[in-house]
Amino acid sequence: MSKKMPETPLLDQLESGPWPSFVTGLKRLATAEDKPYADMMKSLLGQLEHSYETRKGYWKGGTVGVFGYGAGVIPRFSEVADRYGESAEFHTIRIMPAPGFFYDTKTLRQFCDIWEEHGSGLIALHGQSGDVMFQGCRTDQVQVAWDKINEMGFDMGGAGAGVRTSASCLGPARCEQSCFDTLRAHKVVIDSCTDDIHRPSLPYKMKFKFSGCANDCANATQRADIAVFGTWRDDMQVNQDEVKKKVTELGRKEFINQVIRMCPAQALALNDDDTLDVDNKSCVRCMHCINVCTKALKPGRDRGIALLAGGKRTLKIGDMMGTVIVPFMKMETDEDYEALVDFGRRLLDFFADNALEHERLGEMIERIGLVNFLEGMELDLDLNMITRPRTNPYVRTDEWDEEVRKWNDRKAGAAE
Amino acid sequence: MTELRRPNECGVPDAKQFMPPVLVKNYGKWAWHDRPRPGVLRHVAESGDTVYTVKAGFQRQADVFTIRRMCDIADKYCDGHIRFTIRSSVEFMTDDEAKVEPLIKALEDAGYPVGGTGNSVGFISHTQGWLHCDIPGTDASGVVKAMMDQLYDEFRNEDMPNRVKITTSCCQINCGGQGDIAINIQHTKPPVINHELVSGVCERPAVIARCPVAAIRPALVNGKPTLEVDEKKCVCCGACYPPCPPMQINDPVNSKIAVWVGGKHSSTRSKPMFHKLVAAGLPNNAPRWPEVAEVVKKILGAYKADARPWERMGEWIERIGWPRFFEMTDLPFTKYHVDNWRGGRTNLNASAQLHF
Ligand code: SF4
Ligand code: SF4
């Protein structure tokens, strides 16, 4: 026991300055001499300092897991274990937190106790997908640490070519702008995919994220294969007395600058009596005016969700934003949430059947075309799916009359 | 050998068990919110109930001592409830207004800056880096710490035109997502291949398939099957490195840092936008990355001085035009800024609208 603290002149420079320092935290762990992980963390600090010196990483993957699951442990073996032996194995266990990242301190303290006994004492809150990352576990401790975390009622997160841990904004728990129950949708959709989280066998990763409105506090648009947004169909709710107060507070000129002029749809006007005129047919539900006038304006009452598909970062074909595949689904009753779960299941099946290996959903849709995707998923075509109709004539329109008939039938059906 | 325990496939925990009672009581029935001061949110429910949220920054890579200290504060002021945000800030909630000031003081005394609300620079979302990733070109935790030290006041105040979301990523996979400012690794040299190891470690057809420009082909070196890269074609993206670690893309000198601006996920006002490259070739200068900090501060300074209220970084630049942005930030404009990737033509100016 009681290894010497490594010299860390570079890392030491990250202890100065006002922002809380992760290096100070690592050192606290390394100097907790009565704890089982102190030497492991001294060794880790040594390796990290070596990375700072040489500007290179020294971790490699491998195979480590727990009984019954095929994913969720991120194996890390040191490539410089000859010099930093105590942290030669430094695996991460990914755990799914409650939607909205809510905790009580009892739970967090239990996490800490388990990680002091079986891990390094280092926990990231949270990883980019939304997992609790229990970092720094020796291979022989993974199963026992997992057993204890699992017995607390927490399950393992996703990794590899499967459904990943999800993230959602806190929604109705504390936000008046949320148009559906993000936390409930998150739980029911992800709970219906546990097999695809724990035994990944999809072509590639699949991420769902849930944001209560167009503000997208869950950063879903580009980071989720399926982004679920809250929106509304009827008129927004306006409290004209509060509008007048806001006009007085900001001044008429600034109200026009900050609210009226910023509307992307030019849907707003200020009436002569300082009340607000809203053109709800033009409004695109962007949330800007509601964000600025939190007391005066609210989403309408006929609320539900829109689904965007295909968001992803660069690899392989380039960055993609999600695009609309379902413009509106009611999301109030138990049946509505079941319909969303059912959509998720059908999507996973379609993705498993049609995507190439290592192809994200957005890339698959790009390859087969949105129309084929919609037909395969039996989703109705909708004008909200496009920014504008096609601008080039390279298309065969043999079945035009048939498609016109479908459109008319749908319109007639909707009118009933 | 003892019997192995089967996992309890319990899925996502229910959030309500952890929420402050006032949130459970008013679930879905909130009326409005405001911000009494930077770092504090006040939400009022239809019932008239009020909850105050104090938001603070901490180091996302948290040691158990830090977590327990935050728990002590939550026990004392928030009946043991605590929440984290998508971008790794921590939130403490109470329905007792009298507790807000002491709570702020307790957090700041413990070293956790209160802020990150409204039109501030929020905490920088970040990835794992040298501490734990198997493919990192830099150390996100270090970059974030170095930047947040410099942006400390911008976090604690709300004097930006709109919120500023900064992200970092230790490779071009960009786990950090879109940002008003994104600080990302940009490799400048093709992978260096250890031909001895390739056939043993890499599934060669899968590696070939990963390359976006089809620059990888099978080869034979010293009688061993391996892979080689057409270095003229290679765009140095590093996509081949994760499935084939002997194709080392990280380099202490040639892995540079690039700064991108104007990304946003939200559909608020403008549609979501990708961030755009504005600076590259910055050295990966651990442990404090001063060259990167200088560029970031220049961009933030111009944005703060010139953008209209509620304009996000990308919206501001679209309004003033890119010539003006490069002029105001004094950044060089090079041929590398011109998008020649598939679909890049949409980023060219197909109009007679010009800025002088
Ligand atoms: S929500 Fe957006 S589009 Fe609709 S009126 Fe308000 S600012 Fe305009
Ligand atoms: S770095 Fe990218 S472009 Fe170069 S060979 Fe590897 S995958 Fe291809």
Image: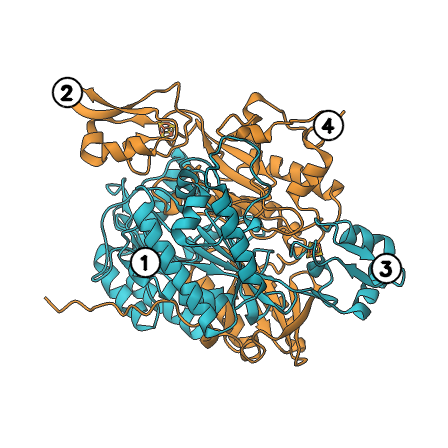
Chain colours: A cyan, B orange
Q: Is mark 1 on a helix, strand or loop?
A: helix
- How far apart marks 3 and 1 lie (CA) works out to 54 Å
Q: Which residue is drawn at 28% across and 54% down?
A: A200
- How far apart marks 2 and 3 lie (CA) works out to 82 Å
Task: Specify the label residue A271 is tagged with.
Answer: 3
Q: What element carries label 2?
A: loop
Which image quadrant is residue B98 in? bottom right
Can residue B30 be seen from the camera position used here? yes
Question: From the viewer's perspective, is the residue at label 4 or at label 2 nearer?
Answer: 4
Binning the other alpha carbons within 10 Å of mark 2 as few (below 14), some (14 to 19) or many (20 upward) gives few
- How far apart marks 1 and 2 lie (CA) works out to 41 Å
Which image quadrant is residue A366 in? top left
Task: Specify the label residue A197 is tagged with.
Answer: 1
- Eyeballing the image, is A199 above or below B311? below
Whether labels 3 and 1 share one chain: yes
Q: Is mark 3 within 8 Å of ligand 1?
A: no
- How far apart marks 1 and 4 lie (CA) works out to 50 Å
Q: Earlier in the sequence, mark 4 or mark 2?
A: 2
Task: Specify the label residue B353 is tagged with.
Answer: 4
